[in-house]
Image: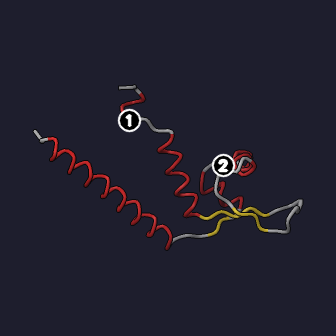
Amino acid sequence: MMTAIEQAIADMVAVQVAAAEKRILENLAATNDSTLSFAQACTYLSISEYTLRNLVKAKAIPHRVHGAEGSKNPRYLFSSNSLDIWKREEEARNYRPNGGSAT
């Protein structure tokens, strides 16, 4: 059994390792970043155009608009790296360990 000091050290190490892992994964993903069109983003995320359009309108998903301000037909572009980060954040937000039971 660990002492309180050993547990505190183990907890601090775990936090630092998780942060380092996140940085490494983000750096690796950045090297493979590509720009996706609206249709490609739908395929990449496995969601419908309707769903993606609603996420864009709500500014709930990272994207950029290509075209003149106020254009009737703006072109939405997505970074595959940003979408990967967004997916991980959504998964973390929607996941509760222990099957969702409060302890």
User: In the rendering, at what x and y percent does residue 5 appear?
Assistant: 16, 46
> Element under label 1?
loop
Looking at the image, is 14 positioned above or below residue 96?
below
Check the image and report above or below for 30 versus 85: below
Q: Quadrant of the C terminus?
A: top left
Which amino acid, mark 2? Answer: Ala
Q: Residues within 10 Å of mark 1 (few under 14, many from 20)?
A: few
For image coordinates 36% across by 61% down, the residue present is: 21
Residue positioned 40% across, 60% down in the render = 22
Instruction: Name the mark on residue 60.
Output: 2
Q: Give the labeled residue for mark 1.
A: 97
**Which of the two discs, 2 and 1, labels the residue nearer the N terminus?**
2
Could you tell me which residue is drawn at 47 percent across and 44 percent down? 92
User: Between marks 2 and 1, how big is the CA–CA gap?
Assistant: 24 Å
Q: In the rendered image, which quarter is residue 76 located in?
A: bottom right
- Quadrant of the image containing the N terminus: top left
Q: Is residue 5 left or right of residue 55?
A: left
The residue furthest bottom is 31
Q: Is residue 36 above or below residue 55?
A: below
Residue nearest the viewer, comparing 10 with 67: 10
Asked if 51 appears above or below 42 in the picture, the reply is above
Q: Which mark is residue 42?
A: none
Amino acid at circle 1: Pro
Q: Position of residue 43 (x, y in %)?
A: 63, 55
The local crowd at label 2, few if under 14, some if 14 to 19, many if 20 or more residues have their Cα within 10 Å, is few
In depth, the one of 75 and 57 nearer the eye is 57
